Image (cartoon, rainbow, N blue to C red):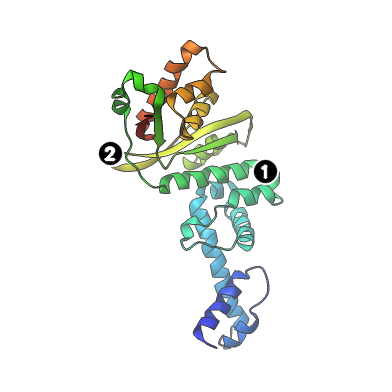
Amino acid sequence: MGLRALQIQMQSALLEVMGARGGALSASIVDAPPLSPQARLDIYRRAYVLRLIDALADSYSMLKRALGDEDFEEIGTRYVAAHPSVHRSIRWYGAELAQFLEGTAPYREHPALAELARFEWTLGGVFDAPDAEAIGRPALKQVAPEDWAGLRFEFHPSMRRLELAWNTVVVWRALSEDQSPPAPELLDAPTPWLLWRREIKGELKNYFRSLDPLEAQALETARNGASFAEVCAAMSPALADEEIPLRAATFIGTWADSGLLTALSIDG
């Protein structure tokens, strides 16, 4: 058997972590006591699973802490069987874990687990996102008053938005501080959250905060390419006309102060 064919058979055997045995590959494995060819292959198959579970633990460290080692390994083993790695970089393995928990018994009976997984994965994506130089409030002050209506905004590539229905952030904070987390609690209504990364004094750090519904709407409108005038128009059902420009400008100033804005453009 050629090397290429042997490599393909080895890959297939490793990917069959919960399926068939080694098949024809066993004939190419040394048969020397005390381990049979199948036992030797099983060592590699288990090592493959454990390495992927380790990658999940890196990305979902707070979920692992909430579940405990044994339960997390059980989830990891089932996830690996359902989702073999397809990425060149193991960093991106585990992207579908939240969906897996939502759709797989018995984990789907505990939706707070899926939400914690989604929050952790989003935080990881925030930290690893491409970088861009942020502009501050002084850039806004340079815009002439007559140009504000046509002002459009570009946002930092790390910015993410989530809607969280549980007290997930409170649980995550407690776990990250080695404290006993509170029990999962369903909120009265889903809460919009903003997550982003910024550099302060040479250090990259993730940030997140909740948004009130009006700011969430304004942010989503601006993020989709709307002008300042269009952002104001989207806010009109919630505020009196005379209140809207100042409130919208306040939101935009806060985004600039937080390092969320990277560029401005003016229509025409």
CB under 8 Å between callouts 2 and 1? Answer: no
Quick check: 268 above or below 200?
above
Residue drawn at x 69%, y 46% is 108
Along the polypeptide, which appears first: circle 2 or circle 1? 1
Look at the numbered disc 2 and give the secondary structure of its residue: loop
Q: Is residue 197 visible?
A: yes
The quadrant of the rendering that contains the C terminus is: top left
Camera-side residue of 144 and 157: 144
* Viewer-nearest residue: 159 or 107: 159
Q: Which amino acid type corresponds to the residue marked 1 in the rendered image?
A: His
**x, y percent for residue 51:** 51, 64
Of the numbered discs in the image, which one, if any, rests on residue 146? none
Residue to which mark 2 is pinned: 201
What residue is rendered at 44% in x and 44% in y?
126
Residue 166, image quadrant: top right
Viewport quadrant of the N terminus: bottom right
Residue 11, horizontal then vertical, whole percent: 56, 74
Q: Nearer the viewer, mark 2 or mark 1?
A: 2
Q: Which of the 4 image quarters holds residue 182? A: top right
In this view, the residue farthest toward the front is: 268
Please name the residue shown 55% across and 59% down the image. 53
Q: Would residue 185 be found to the left or right of residue 192 on screen? A: right
Disc 1 designates what residue?
A: 110
- Return the x and y of residue 193 as percentages of the image width and height: 51, 33
x and y, in percent, of residue 14 in the image: 58, 72
- Mark 1 closeness class: few <14, some 14–19, many ≥20 residues within 10 Å: few
